[in-house]
Image: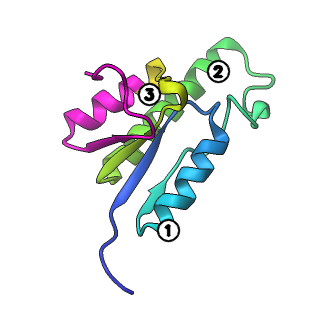
Amino acid sequence: MVGKYPVITLCGSTRFKEEFMEAQKRLTLEGNIVISVGLFGHSGDPEVWDGMDEGTLSKTKEMLDDMHKRKIDMADEIYVINVGRYIGESTKSEIAYALAHGKTVRYLTEPETKIV
């Protein structure tokens, strides 16, 4: 099969590594191109932050947040990994960004309250 495949960027807390991997597999098998995070700083990739002073840590976090917004730019929609309905500040920012740029937002678990 050759065709146009929807592009989905995964968003959510990197503490949910297992759920990211499950969603990536499922969405790929459903015929989507899936863009995910490059590392899991809150679950599984602690070396990312090891030895960084506060200034470097802040710059790295800022870079990673910006890179993820560029991934949202490339996508048709985002899929929010919100285990237990948890949505942190970075993810709220990504949802707001996606909505402001006309992207569809879907959730692993429908949130109790509307975001933005």
Say which quadrant the N terminus sits in: bottom left
Mark 2 vs 3: CB contact within 8 A: no
Q: Is residue 92 left or right of residue 57?
A: left
The quadrant of the picture occupied by the C terminus is top left
Of the pair 51 and 68, the residue shown nearer to us: 68
Of residues 103 and 66, the one nearer the viewer is 103
Residue hosting label 2: 57
Question: Residue 68, percent across and down?
Answer: 45, 39
Q: Is residue 39 in view from this perspective?
A: no
Q: Earlier in the sequence, mark 1 or mark 2?
A: 1
> Residue type at mark 1?
Leu
Provide the secondary structure element on which disc 1 rests: helix
Q: Where residue 67 sits: x, y (%)?
A: 46, 40
Residue 115 on the magenta span: yes
Counting from the top left corner in percent of width and height, residue 98 is at: 29, 37
Where residue 31 sits, quadrant-wise, is bottom left
Amino acid on which the number 3 mark rests in the picture = Thr
Q: Which is nearer the N-term, disc 2 or disc 3?
A: 2
**Magenta residue check for 106:** yes
Please identify the quarter of the rendering in which residue 46 is found.
top right
Disc 3 to disc 1, C-alpha distance: 25 Å
- In the rendered structure, find residue 91 and report the number of the disc placed on it: 3
Q: Which residues are magenta?
A: 92-116
* Corner quadrant of residue 78: top left
Is residue 102 shown to the viewer in this render? yes
Q: Which residue is mark 1?
A: 29
Q: Secondary structure at mark 3?
A: helix
Closer to us: mark 3 or mark 1?
Answer: 1
Q: Nearer the viewer, residue 76 or 65?
A: 76
